[in-house]
Amino acid sequence: MHIEPGVVTGAKILLSYATAAGAFGLTARLARHTLEGRDGFTALIGRSLVATLCVFCFFEVLPHHAVGVSEVHLILGSTLLLLFGAGPTAIGLALGLLIQGLFFAPFDLPQYGMNVTTLIVPLWGISVLAGRLIPRDTPYVEVTYRQALALSTAYQGGIVLWVGFWAFYGEGLSAQSLVNVSTFGVAYMSVVILEPLIDLGVLALAKWRTGMTRGPLFNARLHRPAL
């Protein structure tokens, strides 16, 4: 989902600053929800740090390939949401992306506003979807394959839509840009095959290791119904 350098340039890149500000506003809103929850500030900080480490590893350690106008990554946004909650996950995505740019991929820093928007806005969307899709009396360790698939598809689909927007905004609507975006979209949506299975595997492990995953480093909703 990293927008390739040169896709959006010049004055057009100013729009990414505005969308990033909106994404940070959503992050603050989601973080406030965690602060107002069962565990408060300590939980927000701890979960955000773990989520940041996970995101950094997803970007730098897991396989990733340039396809069309962007790169295909296994980000596991829905997995992080279920494990840590929306607020810590949003902070983890923003910080993990920033650390990668500062220390390992400085050529991506001009695209930071676009990339952080592309990651966080769909996360906010699936946090809303999860609230409607998963009954309040259902702990996340009891999430079904169908629910996990819906969350993953929505998140990856949101990323593809944002990548397409940035590509068409920067390069215009041409035959080549259509091919590039379509190629990326097909490749990226293949992640949907893996992510729900990873979600269920991780949740099964969390359920099995209840004693380790009931602490403040994990989402309280993991094992308990919503308040």
Image (cartoon, rainbow, N blue to C red):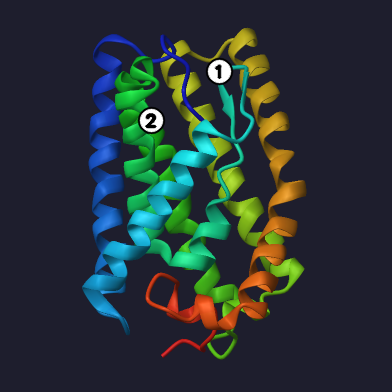
The crowding category of the residue bearing disc 1, from other C-alpha atoms within 10 Å (few below 14, some 14 to 19, many at least 20), is many
In the rendered image, residue 217, in percent from the top left (x then y), is placed at 40, 70
**Residue at disc 1, secondary structure:** loop
Location of residue 117 with respect to 29 vertically, above or below: above
**Residue at disc 2, secondary structure:** helix
Q: Which residue is mark 2?
A: 100
Q: Which residue is mark 1?
A: 69
Location of residue 106 with respect to 190 vertically, above or below: above
Q: CA distance from mark 2 to mark 1?
A: 19 Å
Left of 117 or right of it: where is 168? right
Q: Which residue occupies the foreground of this view, 158 or 215?
A: 215
Q: Are marks 2 and 1 in contact (CB under 8 Å)?
A: no
Residue positioned 48% across, 29% down in the render: 165
Total marks drawn? 2
The crowding category of the residue bearing disc 2, from other C-alpha atoms within 10 Å (few below 14, some 14 to 19, many at least 20), is some
* Residue type at the position of mark 2: Gln
Location of residue 122 with respect to 107 vertically, above or below: below
When asked about the image quadrant of residue 206, the answer is bottom right
In the rendered image, residue 193, in percent from the top left (x then y), is placed at 77, 47
Q: Quadrant of the C terminus?
A: bottom left
Q: Which residue occupies the foreground of this view, 155 or 98?
A: 98
Label 2 vs label 1, nearer the camera: 2
Left of 70 or right of it: where is 186? right
* Residue type at the position of mark 1: Val
Residue positioned 51% across, 58% down in the render: 80
When asked about the image quadrant of residue 200, the answer is bottom right
Per the rendering, the mark at residue 222 is none
- Sequence order check, earlier mark of 2 and 1: 1
Residue positioned 49% across, 20% down in the render: 168
